[in-house]
Image (cartoon, grey):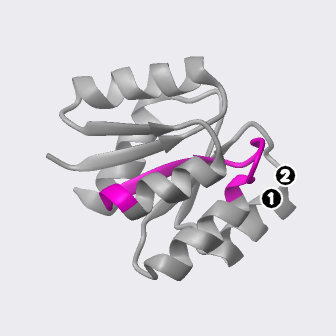
Amino acid sequence: MPKILVVDDAAFMRLRVAKLLTENGYEVLEAGDGQEGVDQYKKNKPDLVLMDITMPVMDGITAVQEIKKHDPNAVVVMCSALGQQTMVMNSVKAGAKDFIVKPYQPEKILDTIKRFIG
């Protein structure tokens, strides 16, 4: 069963995404900020990370950079309500594979995950 790490400071967002993923056969890990996300990644080696950008303690872009230092092959997909070009570019530069805009569309999340981990 593929493991997905959902990193978002909004508990209700983690809950919604976790429910969707669990219903579709994925194992879900959760983290409430970037630092927690990096720690969870190192401990559990998930197949894919869904990473929010704007979070306390450590933002998503910094977290991606930390995860990539630890595992250059990590698959990280950024999620953010900010449809800003600079955020997208910074995430890609940091090593993100893709970008999903909130509010989430369930099909978009599932399609994106399937594209990277089948």
State the SS at label 1: helix
* Relative side of 29 to 14, left or right: left
Q: Position of residue 102 (x, y in %)?
A: 66, 33
Determine which residue is flagged by label 1.
87
Q: Nearer the viewer, residue 114 or 68?
A: 68
Residue 46 appearing in the image: no
**Measuring 51% from the left and 27% from the top, which residue is drawn there?**
14
**Measuring 40% from the left and 33% from the top, which residue is drawn there?**
107
- In the image, the segment drawn in magenta is 43-60
Q: Quadrant of the C terminus?
A: bottom left
Q: Classify 21 as above or below 37.
A: above
Question: Exactly how many numbered labels are in the figure?
Answer: 2
* Relative side of 97 to 82, left or right: left
Q: The residue under label 1 is which amino acid type?
A: Met
Q: Position of residue 29 (x, y in %)?
A: 37, 39
Residues packed near mark 1 inside 10 Å, few (<14), some (14 to 19) or many (20 plus): some
**Measuring 23% from the left and 38% from the top, which residue is drawn there?**
26
* Relative side of 84 to 75, left or right: right
Q: Which mark is residue 84?
A: 2
State the SS at label 2: loop
* Relative side of 88 to 14, left or right: right
Q: Do callouts 2 and 1 mark residues in contact (Cβ within 8 Å)?
A: yes
Q: CA distance from mark 2 to mark 1?
A: 5 Å
Q: Classify 7 as above or below 103.
A: below
Q: The residue under label 2 is which amino acid type?
A: Gln
Within the image, what quadrant is residue 81 found in? Answer: top right
